[in-house]
């Protein structure tokens, strides 16, 4: 059933099997209970363990097994109880069964299926419910006994019944439940030092019990003969032991005290002035011993568990702080600072009295020392920066968030720290300052880079628009000055031919017309090659670069040497265009800036990448001066190519020294899919 997580019997077994397991246990408990009856007629008992075994069995099993357990208990009570007639024993059995069922139901409802004996509230609630249930049972039980011929008073019988049932429940229920929870195992119950301590505790308890209850040679009572001397030994066990050890010790005290009293020895046997005198005094003593010590044990265990939880939480917190990448620190003020001081006075006060009380590795790494107890003024400047914000934090309610401190570093490598402070003010006096500092240097660097890239991209977008317009104007100018003029000349030649034909005159010389057509054709081809390099899309990058180098050498009158390793170079169409544009841009840079009479272009395959090298023996330059920023050295060409190469997984590397020329390496990834298609096409042939 839901909510019955404590059950150890019946959750998998049939209720009949559970009842069969419970039967010998309850028979033994009833037998012991009958042995503890003190009147010849069997009217009262000092201790009734059967009530404890029944309640514990009900609490350990699901509700579907309760009818079987109650039936077994009634059968055993009615047949083994040795006082009175059959009708009376049946009534007594019904009272015992009803008392156990009521107690188990109340505990299940108000405490829960799992009783925590390390909780003082749960333990006290359990004792009160057992006290209430056994009280109701004693009222009915005393009424049953009063209807017999036993010459006892009702209330005396009721008190004896009540205390016997309550003691049986309060001693055995915690004992059975705690041992059932931990398992019936002695090995590994504690470490050897703890086992020795436990053995010593029980040895001392046995000696005290023998001295108080079993030593019959003493003539009178002294202070050391008091039965409450047992408290001293029990408190030792309660202080250092858990619920299993404590409940076992209480069972031992109960068994020894009852056995000695019924045998006529011990302090309670000499106080009898009525048939119920020894029993009631002994029961009152045991109740005053068992109930408070159970609650004391639960309270101590609860506090010990709370302390352990606090220690674990503190250990986790300290581990988190110690391994945190942020600098965490705490300042204590040797003299609390009045918050009413002026900000300048507050700053002076902090310099004099604030000391590092706690810090982690990140703090010590940031400060270079940061050992506890050091003055604030003994630490680097960033602490001075962040503590300067303390007056503002006090004015803002005790907190200063995200105070940015920029610390100058060597070679321009400044560090940026983001500091947050929290102050503790009591009675107008500042006593403590908590701080967290985070190094955001990398974040600020990345932020500046992103801002710079955004500016570059905006400039590039503007330049692309302008470049597109320039290209249109150049094409328009080429068409106007070249092809358009040729077409006008053709039109004039055709008009002259038509006029001569109409007038019957000899036709003009057609050689000039052929020359004009040839010039127009050359102009169109030149324009086409400038817009679309020949062989780039159909023959590949090698053919395109071959034409480019030849055309560049012809136009610029610079010796160009083109070398290719002859290996296949499968590239996607976009990569092919990008590599071609990179080579063209690099050749243009050579013509504009290198002042070199020769340039070498080498193309080869290295691993799965294409390497294009452009080298010249020109004037060279300092690579550190090349920022790739648009409108600066390098211009938009190199910037655009570098960014586009980065997108496809390529790179642009420049190696240059003034006076020793320049070497530029362009790398781009090969396309394995294109290579696979070419191999398949070759195999098909």
Image (cartoon, grey):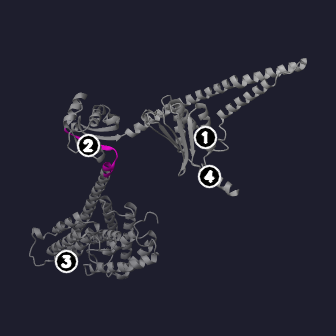
Q: In which quarter of the image is residue 602?
A: top right
Q: Would residue 280 be found to the left or right of residue 12 on screen?
A: left
| Numbered mark located on residue 382 in the image | none
Q: Name the residue under label 2.
A: 368
| Above-or-below relation of 118 to 408 | below
Q: Give the range drawn in magenta.
A: 319-334
Vertical arrangement, residue 556 with respect to residue 272, above or below: above
Q: Residue at point 61% right, 41% down?
A: 546
Residue 534, horizontal then vertical, whole percent: 67, 39
Q: Give the secondary structure at mark 3.
A: helix
Residue 65 percent location from the top left of the image: 44, 72
C-alpha separation, residue under disc 4 versus residue under disc 3: 102 Å
Label 2 to label 1: alpha-carbon separation: 58 Å
Residue under label 3, please give it: 260
Q: Residue 545 carries which label?
A: 1
Q: Name the residue under label 4.
A: 675
């Amino acid at each position: 059933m839901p909510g019955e997580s404590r059950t150890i019997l019946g959750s998998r077994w049939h209720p009949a099997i559970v009842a069969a397991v419970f039967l010998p246990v309850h028979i033994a408990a009833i037998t012991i209970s009958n042995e503890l009856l003190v009147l010849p007629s069997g009217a009262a008992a000092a201790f009734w363990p059967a009530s404890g075994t029944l309640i514990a069995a009900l609490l350990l099993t699901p509700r579907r097994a309760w009818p079987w357990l109650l039936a077994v208990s009634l059968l055993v009570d009615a047949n083994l109880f040795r006082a009175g007639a059959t009708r009376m024993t049946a009534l007594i059995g019904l009272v015992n069964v009803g008392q156990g069922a009521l107690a188990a139901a109340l505990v299940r409802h108000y405490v829960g299926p799992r009783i925590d004996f390390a909780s003082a509230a749960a333990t006290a609630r359990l004792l009160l419910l057992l006290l209430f249930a056994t009280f109701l049972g004693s009222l009915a039980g005393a009424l049953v006994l009063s209807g017999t011929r036993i010459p006892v008073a009702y209330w005396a019988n009721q008190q004896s019944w009540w205390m016997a049932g309550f003691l049986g429940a309060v001693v055995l229920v915690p004992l059975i439940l705690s041992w059932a929870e931990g398992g019936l195992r002695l090995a590994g119950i504690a470490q050897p030092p703890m086992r020795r301590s436990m053995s010593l505790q029980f040895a001392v308890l046995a000696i005290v019990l023998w001295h108080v209850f079993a030593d019959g040679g003493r003539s009178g009572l002294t202070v050391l003969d008091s039965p409450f001397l047992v408290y001293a030994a029990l408190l030792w066990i309660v202080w250092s032991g858990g619920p299993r050890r404590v409940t076992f010790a209480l069972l031992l005290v109960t068994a020894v005290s009852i056995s000695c009293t019924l045998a006529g020895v011990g302090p309670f046997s000499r106080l009898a002035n009525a048939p119920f005198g020894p029993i009631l005094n002994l029961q009152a003593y045991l109740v005053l011993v068992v109930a408070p010590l159970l609650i004391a044990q639960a309270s101590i265990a609860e506090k010990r568990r709370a302390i352990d939880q606090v220690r674990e939480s503190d250990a986790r917190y300290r581990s988190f702080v110690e391994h945190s990448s942020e600098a965490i620190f705490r300042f204590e003020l040797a003299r609390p600072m009045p918050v009413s001081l002026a900000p300048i006075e507050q700053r002076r006060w902090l310099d004099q009295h604030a000391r590092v009380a706690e810090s982690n590795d990140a703090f010590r790494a940031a400060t270079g020392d940061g050992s506890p107890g050091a003055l604030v003024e003994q630490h680097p400047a960033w602490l001075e920066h962040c503590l300067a914000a303390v007056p503002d934090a006090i004015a803002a309610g005790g907190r200063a968030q995200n105070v940015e401190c920029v610390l100058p570093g060597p070679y321009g490598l400044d560090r940026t720290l983001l500091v947050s402070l929290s102050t503790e003010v009591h009675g107008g006096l500042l006593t403590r300052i908590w701080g967290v500092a985070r190094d955001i240097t990398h974040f600020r660097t990345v932020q500046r880079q992103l801002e710079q890239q955004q500016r570059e991209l905006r400039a590039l977008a503007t330049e692309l628009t302008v470049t597109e317009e320039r290209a249109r104007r150049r094409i328009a100018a080429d068409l106007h000055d070249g092809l358009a003029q040729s077409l006008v000349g053709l039109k004039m030649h055709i008009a002259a031919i038509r006029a001569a034909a109409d007038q019957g005159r000899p036709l003009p010389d057609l050689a000039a017309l052929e020359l004009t057509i040839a010039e127009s054709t050359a102009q169109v081809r030149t324009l086409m090659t400038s817009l679309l390099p020949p062989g780039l899309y159909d023959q590949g990058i090698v053919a395109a670069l071959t034409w480019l180098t030849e055309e560049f050498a012809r136009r610029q009158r610079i010796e160009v040497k083109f070398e290719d390793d002859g290996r296949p170079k499968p590239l996607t169409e976009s990569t092919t265009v990008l590599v071609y544009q990179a080579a063209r841009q690099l050749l243009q840079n050579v013509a504009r800036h290198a002042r070199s009479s020769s340039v070498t272009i080498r193309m080869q395959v290295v691993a799965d990448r294409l390497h294009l090298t452009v080298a010249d023996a020109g004037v060279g330059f300092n690579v550190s001066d090349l920022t790739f920023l648009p409108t600066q050295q390098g211009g938009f060409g190199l910037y655009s190519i570098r960014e586009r190469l980065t997108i496809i997984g390529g790179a642009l590397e420049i190696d240059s020294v003034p006076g020793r020329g320049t070497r530029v390496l362009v790398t781009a990834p090969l396309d394995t899919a294109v290579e696979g298609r070419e191999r398949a096409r070759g195999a098909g042939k």
